[in-house]
Amino acid sequence: MSDNSSGKEITVPPIADELGRVFADGGFELHLVGGPVRDAVLRRSVSDLDFTTDARPESTEAILRANCSTVWTTGADFGTIGGLFRGEQVEVTTFRADAYDRVSRNPIVRYGDNLVDDLERRDFTVNAMAVSVPGHEFTDPFGGLADIARQTIRTPASPESSFADDPLRMLRAARFAAQLGFGIDPETLDAMRRMAPELGRITAERIRDEFVKLLTAPDPVVGLRILVDTGLAEQFLPELPALRMEIDEHAQHKDVYEHSLQVLRNAIALEQDGPDLLLRLAALLHDIGKPETKDVVDGGGVTFHHHDVAGARLARRRMRDLKFPKADVQAVSLLISLHLRFYGYGDAGWTDSAVRRYVHDAGAQLDRLHLLVRSDCTTRNRRKAERLRRDYDAFEDRIARIRADEDLRAVRPDLDGNAIMELLGLEPGPQVGRAWAYLKELRLERGPMPRQEAESQLRAWAAAEGLAPSPDAE
């Protein structure tokens, strides 16, 4: 179907028309395609301009080199040439009519000779629309415009064929539901349930990237429910559906799955500078240690002792399997391991030493830990929720007061390694490390000390450890 009137109503960035005229001068078609067209229909901001053309890659490259300040050919094997055109990043791909081996997902790249065949190979109808530039002829052969009106995600070809070509499209369907607030067509959703195991053909890196896009969407809970309900989560994040533990009348406990989704919502509501992936991951996974540590005690109660430790271990393993960066793995597992430590602060009366250790152990993740702990309160008991809020307000105020006097983020001993060696007459080695660790513990326990006091404490410790300073060290 081609609908010229609809194309006229779509606002096309002027730079797209400029590039279209350049291709037209060379005798080629150029169409704005995919996400930019969908977003233009939805009156959303249009970025990451993607184009398709009947020009072969070598012709596209020649045109872009003549008109762009920079050109890159990293996608040339797949018919894609990129460039910086009038200061904007553009990518132009030759019409494709690929075939798939349906084993590795690797496409056998075949160039097509018409726009409709190119659109049919795309993931969803809402992404299978095109607008010619500069003519603005609107092409929508698979009803994408109607699906946008219905707020429905549906595949251009049969869902079985589409997902067999690239199983990652099943994750992408959940991601678009989270990003756009659309529902998934029942036939498409049914295929996702039946074909979920096909996700095993996809590399961990591609799954991770798609999951990150879902998790940083405006409403990731929508997408996460789809992943769990279709069985897709079971393929790469089985700890999430495992949170749906049976709750019987004799051993009642909070619905951990629903609680985790609510904590994620709470964390999102506290974000101030856009999506925080590490906070969202920690919020979603903070209780994944509960199924492993659940224990029914006499009288019908339930405990989850050390689920923070178990959860940190499970999160670390899962994130490593998904090839997350090492720093991200460490940050999320640390947040999960610390998310329970605050509880009891209001009753126990922490010492300054305990506060220093909390801040020291959280390190660079302290601000995220504050948000995670606040998000973890999902009780419907208003009085209890208000008490927890007041306690944490007081806790943060106390941290701020101690911070005003001490650099809590960078707690270091009052003497450095050189001073330790000089004072104790030691050569570089493990004994210096032990002395340094002792002083650091002393610093955490007592706060900053005058140098003379630190030296006196170190001498006493060294004597007790059999490391008394030599006479020459005095």
Image: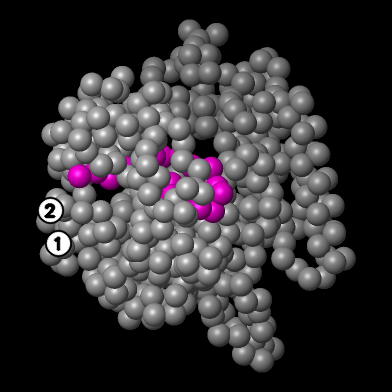
Q: Label 2, on which residue?
A: 110
The N terminus appears in which quarter of the rendering?
bottom left
Q: Nearer the viewer, residue 178 or 69?
A: 69
Q: Are marks 2 and 1 in contact (CB under 8 Å)?
A: yes
Q: Nearer the viewer, residue 10 or 431?
A: 10
Residue 470 x, y percent position in the rendering: 48, 15
Q: Is residue 43 in sight in this rendering? A: yes
Q: Secondary structure at mark 2?
A: loop
Indicate whether 229 appears above or below 87.
below
What number is the disc on residue 136? none
The residue positioned 31% from the left and 73% from the top of the image is: 159
Label 1: state its secondary structure. strand
Tell me which label, 2 or 1, sits earlier in the chain.
1
Mark number for residue 99? 1
**Depth check: 292 or 169 in front?**
169
Picture layout, residue 467 above or below residue 302:
above
- Residue that appears at 29% across and 29% down: 22
Separation of residues labelled 2 and 1 (CA atoms): 7 Å
Kind of residue at badge 1: Ala
